[in-house]
Image (spheres, grey):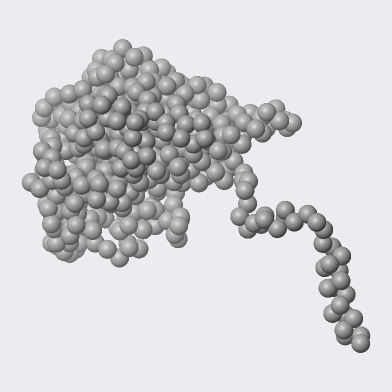
């Protein structure tokens, strides 16, 4: 009898605790509907870095378009097939959905917190700093979209309720608005206070570094516009320099990846964990470095045939079928799971300063001094010995006074080398300066006769947002891979 009573008591208690309100039964306690702004920020920052770092042919083919790498058994992407794997769709979706949307949600939570703020003055400054950092990285992401596609949704983007079929805004207008936001965000940062702290995977919440990043990004975008609007570009470039841009390698925007997935470097995932041998250094790139006896070669790829120190480097034929074992390979350095991803470097800024000087923009220093500083910074970043750097800069085919060609060729070719493993920016530099001279492979998708100048718009946009898509395609001169962007004038 006693044992039956012990069983009955919890049963009676269960019934006694019941009520007519059953709404709580629909709550999934394992899938929360609210979150914290720092979680969304970290997720977006990580997704952004992954997108510009990855070499998966489903995600990012920019190293191929820059002809720094090529493929082995499946050369479709090196032959400019964008639609077989829906590459534009993925690039678009990651940047809008996984990056910009999360940044927007994080900012909305911070704005709500600000509207109801009850903390200290110092806490208020931290809150404002967080909002500014989000604005800076959002500008970076939108800049990638413009530099990839041209006109894209901007003023009506990220608003599925209000604008389910967003219009495409003019690319140059977007650029100028982004530059304005970068200027405002940099000026608003209180550099004596923190921002996201450890939730910031790039600068650890260091607002002084974020200010330099914002100014440097503003400077880069201004130089991109130099052929489209020289006066505006000059004004913005000088303002950015005055506000404070990168001055050393440690200023660069790097994200230190972790040893294990899903936080390992995407290159490790694509090149090692996948167990596949899909990529090789391209002959276009390797041949140029061989001609210059460039000391970065052993940092970039293995020697051939067995990596034993032969000092011979051989690239796979760009855009053709290649046998993996017949060529040099991608160095193990960048296949390390902890190898950092990068958004912007000091070397890149020095090349842009050299370009600015040649364009007549009154930055301090000469084109030659900035050119040398850019090459030096790149080599230091890759661990090249000082003596080797000095020897390289003294070569007649490297020295600014004696190297072949116009300033565009000198800066363009050396920038292309220094931007190794940063395919998107290497491709952008090529498109802006038209150097190095890159030729399309013999076999190409749709029989393209030149290197693509942009991605075509995503197929899903052509289906679901047809009216806006058609208007944009008409405005830019046709949705083709060889339609130039607004800043690509020559």
Task: Give the image location of residue 94, x and y in percent.
Answer: 40, 44
The single residue placed furthest to the left in the displayed view is 442
Quadrant of the rendered image containing residue 277:
bottom left
Q: In which quarter of the image is residue 169?
A: top left
Quarter holding the N terminus?
bottom right
178 or 378: which is nearer to us? 178
Picture coordinates of residue 64, whole percent (x, y): 22, 46
In this rendering, position of residue 216 left or right of residue 414: right
The residue at 20%/47% (across/down) is 81
Q: Residue at x 49, y 34 (%)?
A: 159
Q: In which quarter of the image is the C terminus?
A: top left
Query: As rendered, which of 13 and 389 lies closer to the eye?
Result: 13
Relative to residue 29, is residue 5 depicted above or below?
below
Instruction: Tell me residue 454's x, y (percent).
Output: 25, 35
Q: Residue furthest front?
A: 20
Disc count in the image? 0
x 16%, y 35%: residue: 436
Q: In this picture, is 44 found above or below 162?
A: below
Q: Residue furthest bottom?
A: 1
Image coordinates of residue 54 in percent, x first then y, are 34, 49
Along the viewing direction, whichever of 332 and 2 lies nearer the viewer:
2
**Residue 166 visible in the snapshot:** yes
Query: What residue sits 88% from the left and 85% below the top?
Result: 3
Q: Residue furthest top?
A: 231
């Amino acid at each position: 009898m006693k044992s039956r009573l012990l069983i009955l008591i919890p049963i009676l208690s269960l019934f006694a605790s019941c009520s007519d309100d059953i709404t709580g039964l629909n709550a999934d306690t394992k899938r929360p509907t609210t979150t914290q702004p720092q979680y969304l920020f970290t997720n977006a920052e990580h997704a952004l870095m992954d997108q510009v770092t990855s070499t998966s042919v489903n995600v990012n083919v920019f190293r191929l378009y820059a002809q720094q790498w090529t493929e082995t058994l499946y050369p479709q992407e090196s032959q400019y097939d964008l639609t077989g794997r829906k590459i534009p769709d993925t690039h678009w979706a990651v940047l809008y959905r996984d990056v910009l949307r999360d940044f927007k949600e994080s900012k909305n939570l911070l704005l709500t917190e600000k509207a109801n703020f009850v903390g200290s003055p110092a806490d208020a400054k931290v809150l404002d700093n967080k909002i500014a950092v989000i604005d800076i990285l959002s500008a970076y992401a939108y800049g990638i979209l413009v530099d990839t596609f041209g006109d894209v949704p901007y003023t009506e983007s990220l608003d599925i309720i209000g604008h389910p079929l967003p219009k495409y805004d003019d690319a140059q207008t977007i650029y100028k608005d982004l530059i304005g936001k970068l200027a405002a965000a940099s000026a608003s940062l209180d550099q004596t206070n923190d921002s996201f702290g450890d939730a910031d995977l790039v600068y650890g919440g260091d607002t002084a570094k974020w200010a330099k990043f914002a100014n440097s990004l503003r400077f880069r975008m201004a130089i991109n516009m130099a052929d489209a609007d020289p006066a505006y570009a000059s004004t913005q470039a000088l303002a950015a320099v005055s506000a404070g841009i990168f001055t050393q390698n440690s200023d660069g925007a790097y994200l230190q990846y972790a040893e294990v997935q899903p936080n390992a470097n995407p290159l490790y995932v694509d090149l090692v964990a996948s167990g596949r041998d899909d990529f090789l250094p391209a002959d276009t790139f390797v041949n140029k470095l061989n001609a210059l006896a460039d000391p970065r070669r052993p940092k970039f790829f293995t020697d051939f045939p067995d990596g034993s120190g032969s000092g011979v480097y051989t690239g796979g034929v760009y855009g053709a079928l290649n046998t993996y074992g017949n060529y040099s390979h991608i160095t193990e350095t960048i296949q390390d799971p902890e190898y950092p991803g990068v958004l912007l470097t000091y070397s890149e800024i020095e090349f842009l300063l050299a370009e600015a000087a040649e364009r007549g923009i009154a930055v301090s220093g000469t084109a030659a001094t900035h050119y040398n500083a850019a090459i030096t910074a790149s080599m230091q970043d890759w661990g090249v010995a000082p003596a080797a750097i000095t020897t390289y800069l003294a070569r007649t085919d490297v020295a600014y006074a004696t190297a072949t060609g116009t300033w565009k060729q000198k800066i363009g070719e050396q920038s292309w080398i220094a931007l190794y493993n940063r395919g998107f920016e290497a491709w952008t530099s090529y498109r802006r300066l038209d150097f190095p001279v890159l030729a399309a492979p013999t076999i190409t998708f749709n029989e393209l006769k030149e290197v693509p100048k942009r991605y075509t718009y995503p197929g899903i946009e052509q289906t679901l947002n047809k009216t806006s898509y058609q208007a944009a395609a008409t405005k830019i001169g046709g949705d083709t891979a060889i339609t130039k962007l607004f800043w690509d004038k020559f």
